[in-house]
Image (cartoon, rainbow, N blue to C red):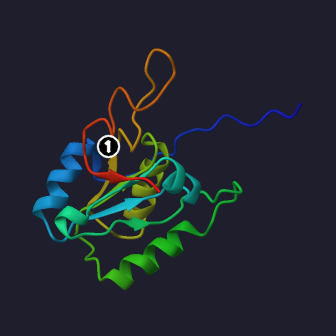
Amino acid sequence: MAKFPEFKMPEGDYAGDVTAREAWRELESNPQALLVDVRTQVEWTLIGKPDLSSIGREPLYLDWVACQGKQPPFAEQLQAALAERGVARDAPIYFMCQSGGRSKVAAIECTALGYTAAYNIAEGFEGDLDAQQHRNSVNGWKVAGLPWTQS
């Protein structure tokens, strides 16, 4: 049986970690703030998506890793999407994934592109594992009672 190499979290600069509630407060109060969900299409469809419609906003959905496990050209896609939306280099950008791993890497990549306020929502959409190794009970976007939808 093939053994996969252990994943090591890359080192790099980014604005820091925030909770889902902290990100929500900034999204509510700052029209320049942006939420970028870097999970996969399968996660958005089966697990749910953050719903910013109550504040007249729409997240940016951009896979950090494609469903097939292949790494898309994330940095290039992110830079194009931010330019298309006219996002300023100093605008607060909040990255979210399932539990804070992929989104941290995305925040580091965004900072490397020259954006100065790229944050990681460390809890993610589903939060940390509980004692039974289940998500959605400890913390995260859903547990915080923030708006979300599911298709």
Kindly give the residue lying farthest to the right in the view shown: 1
In this rendering, is residue 77 above or below 35? Answer: below
Looking at the picture, how far across and down is residue 147, in whole percent?
27, 51
Q: Quadrant of the N terminus?
A: top right
Q: Which residue is mark 1?
A: 141
**Mark 1 element type:** loop
Report x, y in % for residue 150: 43, 53
At x 58%, y 54%, the residue is 42
Where residue 139 appears, as percent x and y from the top left, is 32, 32
Relative vertical location of residue 32 with respect to residue 127 in this rendering, above or below? below
Q: Amino acid at mark 1?
A: Trp
Give the vertical position of 104 relative to 70 (above or below): above
Between 15 and 34, the one nearer to me in the picture: 34
Question: Dot 1: within a 10 Å radius of its alpha carbon, few (fewer than 14), some, or many (20 or more) residues?
Answer: many
Query: Is any part of residue 39 visible from this angle?
Result: no
Task: Please indicate whether residue 97 sits to the left or right of residue 148 in the image.
Answer: right
In the drawing, does residue 114 fall left or right of residue 43? Answer: left
Which residue is pictured at 44% across the width and 76% down the height? 79
In the figure, residue 87 lies in which quadrant?
A: bottom left
Q: Look at the image and tell me whether residue 17 can be seen.
A: yes
**Which residue is nearer to you in this view: 89 or 62?**
62
Q: Name the residue located 62 percent from the left edge and 38 percent from the top edge.
A: 7
Most extreme residue toward the top, as rendered? 131
Locate residue 141 relative to residue 55 in the image: left or right: right
Front-most of 55 and 8?
55
Q: Nearer the viewer, residue 142 or 101?
A: 142
